[in-house]
Image (spheres, helix red, strand yellow):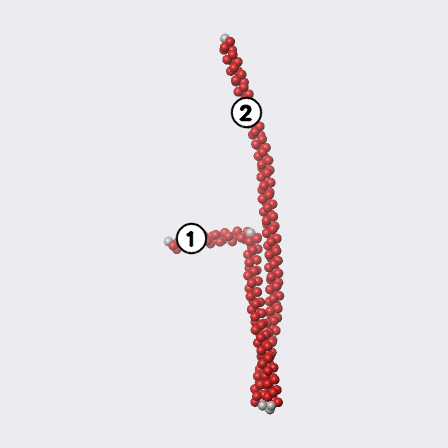
Amino acid sequence: MSNLFTRIKDTISADFNEMLDQKEQKNPIAQLNQYVRRCEQEVKKIRGLVEKQYALKQEFTREYHQAAAMADKRKHQAEVALKANEQELYDQAHKDQVYFEERAAKLDSIRQSAIKELESLESKYVQMKHKLKDLYVKRMELKGRENAAQAHQGMNRVLQADRFAEKSYSTFAEMEDYIERLENQVNAEYRSYTLDARIAELEKRAD
């Protein structure tokens, strides 16, 4: 029994959602609102990607500076060892120097690429925000036009009701004239009946 109730509930819910979807499809403002919501979600997603890209750029920059600093340090140490005729220390320091220079060069290349990607993402993000603001303005414009159209429609109904009322007033006036004529006729017949009755009474007394 519970499964039956569940299926009935799901069917009703599906029919209701379908009805809402059909109603929304017929409503341009609702469709625009749905489109604006999707754009807002995309803008939010892009903002998250921009923030991640900025964090990556910062991390690459930090690693680059550390590698460059170590390359300079080993270069200085190699020079000191060379002057002191410490070949083994010189070879070790020089080897580390080359490693850190290569590492710094690679990190700098990655960092530059990350900076370009970040600039591209930021540019597109700004464009999307402008587009979203344009959509907000367009939505306000359409809502204003819809509101004005509904107001005009309501006023037209009132004006049409006034014209109907004018016709009704004319009909009421005709009915009032008819009733007034009927009342006058009844009053006249009553007066005539009363007059005839009184005279007949007088004649009866005279006899």
Q: Is residue 106 visible?
A: no
Label at residue 81: none
Look at the picture and state if 130 lies above or below 107. above
Label at residue 8: 1
Q: Is residue 132 visible?
A: yes
Residue at 58% over, 44% down: 154
Give the Cα separation between the discs numbered 1 and 2.
66 Å
Q: Residues within 10 Å of mark 2 (few under 14, many from 20)?
A: few
Residue at 62% over, 66% down: 123
Residue at 55% over, 66% down: 48
Q: Which amino acid type is marked by label 1?
A: Ile
| Residue 73 image point, x, y percent | 59, 82
In the rendered image, which residue does mark 2 sit on?
183
Q: Which amino acid type is marked by label 2?
A: Glu
Residue at 60% over, 53% down: 140
| Residue 60 image point, x, y percent | 58, 74
